[in-house]
Image: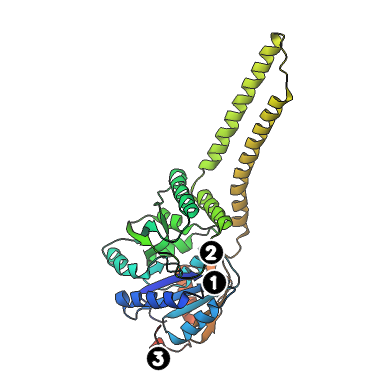
Amino acid sequence: MTQAPLLSIVAPCHNEEEGLREFCRRAAAAAQSVAGDAFELILVDDGSSDGTWEIISDLAAKVPEVLGVRLLRNHGHQLASTAGLSVSRGERVLLIDADLQDPPELLLMMMPILERGADVVYGQRTRREGETWFKLASASLFYRALSKLASVTIPRDTGDFRLMRRRVVDILLAMPERDRFIRGMVSWIGGKQVALPYERDARFAGTTKYPLRKMINFALDAITSFSTTPLRMATWLGMISAGVAVALLVYTFVRWLEGETVTGWSSIMAAVSAFSAIQLICIGIIGEYLGRLVQESKKRPMFMIETILRGSEHAELSTVFPEMSAGDKRAALDAAFASGEPQSQKTSRIG
């Protein structure tokens, strides 16, 4: 069994060929500053259509600390992050995006906080460079709505950029849900979690991988994963609608007793349309939760790994790897590379 590294850096990558080498250079330099050579840099290719995997393969062949993970298809940021965490072996694990919006150098500030007793150190954005007013406004609205709706306290203005102890990562990986909201799941775990305020940089290269459609889906996953308040809101909407309908019925009956006929189809159609809209909204809310229950009940693998690359050696893992316990996963990884070249024989660095 190979010795576990002190630090694992996990970075999901989707079409990041333009800035990936620079990210690796900066991440490796930061890791060496706090862990020497006792670190691993895990790059997860989440179904990229550009040259991302070729760059990962080249880096893995030259740098002993680089571990490449290629998924069979694009699973999305949250599951790609989960795949990277599942193959990590470090006692400390940094989850970070590869677009360099979150500076890897902040690891030098995070590690001492963790060593002083924190379980999680998460980056909290005080400023976001290079983003549109719509993205800033929608993100602000989302985090504030989530903080009101969620059943656990989820810090505002945070992403998945965080340094975690091994025990937190193992608990996170033991959670079986497929529609994952990692920052909320980590908050749910509890322990001592400390914020590190920082200014988020603009993307080093490329374009955002979160268009409006994905942002909406992500927000729905977050809310439905950590709050049943929308279901209660649907119940209250139904009760209010029923009350209004009864009041209209009484009003119409009283007017009929007085010999007055309520005329006009416009008011009737408006009332029917309003009640129909409320009913559809309630059905939609219930459908969101029911759909997630259906997906969970299928128990499909969360992600599918095509290959793992260390140096020039490729390894394939069992399809049940995502469902294994933390200890079994590390044993499977050690077995997959049991005959590989010792890392000490490679000396190339990212430059």
- Residue in view at x 64 percent, y 17 percent: 250
Q: How many marks?
A: 3
Q: Residues within 10 Å of mark 3 (few under 14, many from 20)?
A: few
Most extreme residue toward the top is 258
Pointer 1: what residue? Answer: 15
Q: Quadrant of residue 233?
A: top right
Label 3 vs 2, first from the N-terminus: 2
- Residue in view at x 53 percent, y 60 percent: 210
Please provide percent x and percent y for residue 170. Answer: 43, 65
Q: Is residue 302 left or right of residue 275?
A: left
Tag 1 secondary structure:
loop
Dot 3 amino acid type: Gln
The CA span between labels 3 and 1 is 31 Å
Label 3 vs 1, first from the N-terminus: 1
Most extreme residue toward the bottom is 345
Please provide percent x and percent y for residue 99. Answer: 46, 69
Pointer 2: what residue? Answer: 209
Q: Nearer the viewer, residue 15 or 43?
A: 15
Dot 1 amino acid type: Asn
Task: Return the mark for residue 84.
Answer: none
Task: Return the mark for residue 345.
Answer: 3
Q: Are marks 1 and 2 in contact (CB under 8 Å)?
A: yes
